[in-house]
Image (tube, grey):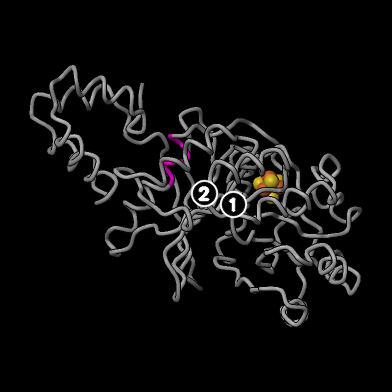
Amino acid sequence: MPTIYDTDAIDELRSRLGVQPHRMKLFRNALFKNAGSWDEALVQLPEHARDEFSNRITVECLELIERHDSDVDVASKLIFQTHDQHLVESVVLRPKTGRTSICISSQVGCACYCSFCATGMMGFTRNLTVSEILDQVTQANRMLKPEKRSIRNVVFMGMGEPLLNLKNVFEAVTFLKVAPFFNLSGTRITVSTVGIPQAMAQFAETFPDVNLALSLHSARQEVREKLMPQAKKYPLEQLRETLVDASRNGKVMIEYLMLSGVNDREEDLRALEDYLRGIPVHINIIPFNEYAGSNLHGTPELERKQFASRLKQAGFDTTLRYSLGSDIAAACGQLVQHRRKEIVP
Ligand code: SF4
């Protein structure tokens, strides 16, 4: 059955039922701009069309089955179930000084097997559809409505490698940008990748105004290969060329997860500086949320701060990310993994 994001099917239904375009605009505004319920949207349509829309259009493609609100900060983790019983997660962040953001998933599981990632341990099941990707944002907006908030930033940094689900992610980004759907400026959307050069180039060409983030985590090939098996396919040298091209659209975000004794030594710092020198980037130093099943440990806060401050002294635009939601296992894939273990011990 078509979904509310299936514009061709909805237009066909609208024209068959003789619904005026302005009524469709009101209908979509109710759903997306005002984060209304299905009933609130339906009353914007002529009475004779309401039953047909209800019977022929799927409203929610994901079922929200769990919500975990952090006791220590303002993060909420949402676990959704797909129609074929898979679990995916999204994290809503309400930073004090920033706009409400959501980190969304693009796949069920992931084929990249990064050693620091709980999702990577699950393996890959399937790509999320465009509707499943967008539904995470729609449902989060509905959840936030009583708080008089709405999603202002969307980050593709949840479960899955977005650039391995290229077609659906490109379509979802287009929906996120346009009215009458989400109407977000490209600068409010970030797509994060492990670094797949051809797809990064395609992304930078198609969406020059949308932020690109690269999960670098090490500028030493041997270390990066251990952390991220995809690095064997796409060596740092090749990645650097793509990075230089992509940064012509604006600064690329470099994600650097700090792991004790792995990528936080003097030689790692020097390699990072050498690798990024001359490229317009913003480096984001990220703490590691430890989880059962991983033998990696995060670099202590003081050392992270020192690492960041050395990068700043070297002239790099650098921020330290504060880890929101550590009490609700907010890092990618952790909660779904807990839940799967409960179902299949
Ligand atoms: S970090 Fe991202 S790309 Fe790597 S395994 Fe996890 S979800 Fe996949």
**Residue located 42% across and 66% down the image:** 99
- Looking at the rendered structure, the kind of residue marked 1 is Met
| In-front residue for pair 344/127 | 127
Q: Earlier in the sequence, mark 2 or mark 1?
A: 2
**Relative to 300, residue 201 above or below:** above
Residues shaded magenta: 131-136
Q: Secondary structure at mark 1?
A: loop
Q: Quadrant of the rendered structure where residue 5 is?
A: top left
**Does mark 2's beta carbon lie closer than 8 Å to ligand 1?**
no
**Relative to 202, residue 116 above or below:** below
What residue is pinned by disc 1? 157
- Looking at the rendered structure, the kind of residue marked 2 is Ile
| In-front residue for pair 97/64 | 97
Q: CA distance from mark 2 to mark 1?
A: 6 Å
Q: Is residue 249 magenta?
A: no
Q: Position of residue 298 (x, y in %)?
A: 75, 68
Q: Secondary structure at mark 2?
A: strand
Q: Are marks 2 and 1 in contact (CB under 8 Å)?
A: yes
**Relative to 74, residue 174 above or below:** above
**Does mark 1's beta carbon lie closer than 8 Å to ligand 1?**
yes
Badge 1: residue crowd in 10 Å (few <14, some 14–19, many ≥20): many
Q: Which mark is residue 104?
A: 2
Dominant SS in magenta = helix
**Relative to 12, residue 137 above or below:** below
Please state, as top left, top right, bottom left or bottom right, where the C terminus lies in the image. Answer: top right
**Residue located 77% across and 59% down the image:** 217
Q: Position of residue 273 (x, y in %)?
A: 82, 69
- Is residue 118 visible from the viewing direction of this image? no
Q: Position of residue 248 (x, y in %)?
A: 64, 55
